[in-house]
Image (cartoon, grey):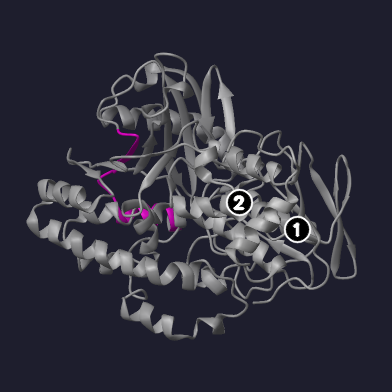
Amino acid sequence: MRTVAGRTDHVVVVGAGLAGLAAALHLLGAGRRVTVVERAAVPGGRAGRVERGGYHLDTGPTVLTMPDLIEEPFAAVGDRMSDRLDLIGLHPAYRARFADGTHVDVHTDASAMESEILRFAGPREALGYRRLRDWLERLYALQMRRFIDANYDSPLQLLRPDLARLAALGGFGRLDARLGRFLADERVRRVFSFQALYVGVPPARALAAYAVIAYMDTVAGVYFPRGGVHALPRALAGAAADAGADMRYRHRVTRLERRGDRVTAVLTDRGRIPCDAVVLTPDLPVAYELLGRRPRRPLRLRHAPSAVVLHAGTTRTWPQLSHHTLSFGAAWKSTFDELTRAGRPMTDPSLLISRPTTHDPGLAPPGRHLHYILAPCPNTDIGPGPRAWQDLAPRYRDGLLAELERRGLTGLGAAIEEECLVTPADWTAEGHAAGTPFSAAHTFLQTGPFRPRNLVHGVANAVLAGCGTTPGVGVPTVLLSGKLAALRITGPRPAAGATRSASRALRPATARGGTG
């Protein structure tokens, strides 16, 4: 693995999102001095927070999986996730509701899910689920440490025995076809492939290897942090500060100072910060502009679909909703054509409805409820541009509410007392390429060693982290991207005892106090 050459004593991390905070913690654990600069007043990046009339809105992800991967950055500095974050397991993880009026609860416990599929679709599908679960577990075990949690310097590094094992598991077939070997019911197959709505590859064209995302959702478990998903970056930032990081909020980076091929300082609107290395976590176009470099790629990056999100603070809720509800339209294959080829909003949308007040009523005023409605839509490369969305947004919002009322959320529009609508125009204003928070699509040529690398050609001491680089989109993988960026600076991870010793040596004598 290639690493940053020369001195790396002081590292500046640009961005206090999940990737930047994970990188900071792993760097601190390896004995580096770390300064984190963030343009916002609080940590979080995409996983931010908006306050509206007593409602506390998560502006980014609402689904949290893989707590063992969340534990890693805390452990890097000898901290514990459980001391800083209260994770609640969701049972069911999702409720899937279909256009024919049926529904299935998605459980991560094998016996509970088998019983639910038996009720919903019969014994043949229940048996197929057991076989699918076994395949997902083997697929994940092979891919995580060998292909996902790994830095690549060349595609040639794929040429090893594990590649043959992945092929033997069917990882290079098509996702929908592979799921069809286990499940005949198209509704049940959607439960294990709906994630393709966000990574930008229809199940009929996606590699079966991408089923590892279904493993995270349907096998490893779905969790909710008390206080909302924004509690996660707050916890990571607290651990970093207590481990010695210099956290500088409301610092907007304006330029990187260079000497030859090395970054020597990060310039912000509030001063100059000398550094020996830098980790950049803004979206790729912003990071490349700061570096004055563009990646050498034969093909232009293709971006994932975007999303319209309606945050609705309401005076009531609806009993048919779970914490996370997947509301599927009758259309499926045509939905992906609209999102990835035709470039128009879904005419029969499949939606994610999250109700965080199910497990944390404190996120809304007393007696009120908070609903987060996510509708995938085309990105601005192939669909309506930011200016068009300014005109389209009110009509889209009204159409979305009308569709939800048709699907049983009667009186939703009248129950809203606070709302916030986010469209591709808003994602564009945040600096997200193609107006999408989901970054580069997970096509074969944009995955693993083919994804934009976290080392930038021509800059000796700059490393990238975040969903646009290795390994990709999603909370677990973004946290891994921070670790992989840190490893580019520190070299292979030290033994656990050495990590704890280094982190203790860095802590101020007053750190943590009596928090355990």
The x and y percentages for residue 449 are 56, 74
Task: Residue type at mark 1: give it.
Answer: Arg
Taking the spot 75% from the left edge, 43% from the top edge, the residue there is 508
Taking the spot 36% from the left edge, 28% from the top edge, the residue there is 358
Q: Nearer the viewer, mark 1 or mark 2?
A: 2
**C-alpha span from label 1 to label 2:** 15 Å
Q: Is residue 356 above or below residue 125?
A: above
Q: Quadrant of residue 321?
A: top left
Taking the spot 50% from the left edge, 81% from the top edge, the residue there is 158
Q: Identify the mark at residue 78; answer none if there is no mark.
A: 2
- Seen in the image, is 148 located left or right of residue 140? right
Is 143 one of the magenta-colored residues?
no
Q: Which residues are magenta?
A: 322-340
Taking the spot 28% from the left edge, 22% from the top edge, the residue there is 410
Residue placed under numbered mark 1 in the picture:
32
Q: Residues within 10 Å of mark 1 (few under 14, many from 20)?
A: many
Check if mark 1's residue and mark 2's residue have beta carbons within 8 Å.
no
- Seen in the image, is 5 located left or right of residue 483? right
Is 326 one of the magenta-colored residues?
yes
Assign a secondary structure to mark 1.
Answer: loop
